[in-house]
Image (cartoon, rainbow, N blue to C red):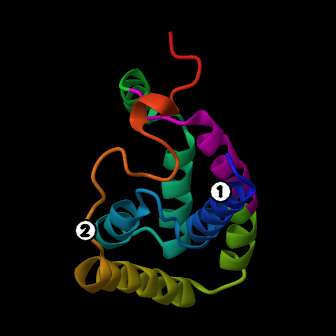
Amino acid sequence: MTTATILLLLLVGLIAGILSGLVGVGGGIIMVPALVLFLGFTQKQAQGTSLGIMLLPVGILAVLQYYKQGYINFNTVFIISAAFVVGGFFGSKLALTLSDDKMKKVFAIVLMLVSLKMLFFDKPAQKSGTSHLSTPTQNVENKP
């Protein structure tokens, strides 16, 4: 893995961590609004709950299935995870300084930006095997 790739992975992890800590993104796009709208949670309660669920090992069975098919590159997972932890710390520190009203607005802006990108600026998906990291079968390390 090149230095540029590692730096890119760290940047992705850091940005994802900041957004996760700031607005609970990561399942939070569905979960946070549902908790606020349907269960009466405050914005911060909903985001904290979403983060708590995301951080528990609820996805382990899905990860195992992807691993069995050769779609997990653990070097990438570990690099992004390390940066995600740091980003999550800073994002949560920032979120806790803001009022619930401001947090709702930040959350809404993130949702709108994601929606606009998906609606108007998404590029067609690359065909399998053209990723710059490697093909799926090359991603598995220590596969039995």
Amino acid type at mark 2: Pro
Tag count in the figure?
2
Instruction: Please state if 50 lies on the left or on the right of 79 as rendered.
Output: left
Q: Which residue is mark 1?
A: 5
Residue 91 appears left or right of 48: right
Q: Quadrant of residue 115?
A: bottom left
Residue depicted at x 68% and y 68% = 92
- In the image, residue 85 lies at what x, y percent? 71, 54
Q: Which of marks 2 and 1 precedes in the sequence?
A: 1
- Residue ID at (28%, 67%): 38
Residue 78 highlighted magenta (yes or no): yes
At x 72%, y 82%, the residue is 97
- Which residue is painted at 42% across and 29% down in the image? 137
**Magenta segment:** 70-86
Task: Please tell me the numbered disc located at residue 88.
Answer: none
* Image location (x, y in percent) of residue 113: 39, 85
* Nearer to us in this view, 24 or 16: 16
Name the residue furthest top.
Answer: 144
Residue 124 is tagged as 2
Q: In the image, what residue type sits under mark 1?
A: Thr
Label 2 SS: loop
Q: How many neighbours does mark 2 have within 10 angstroms: few (below 14), some (14-19), or many (20 or more)?
A: few
Q: Is residue 78 above or below residue 67?
A: below
What quarter of the picture does the N terminus occupy? top right
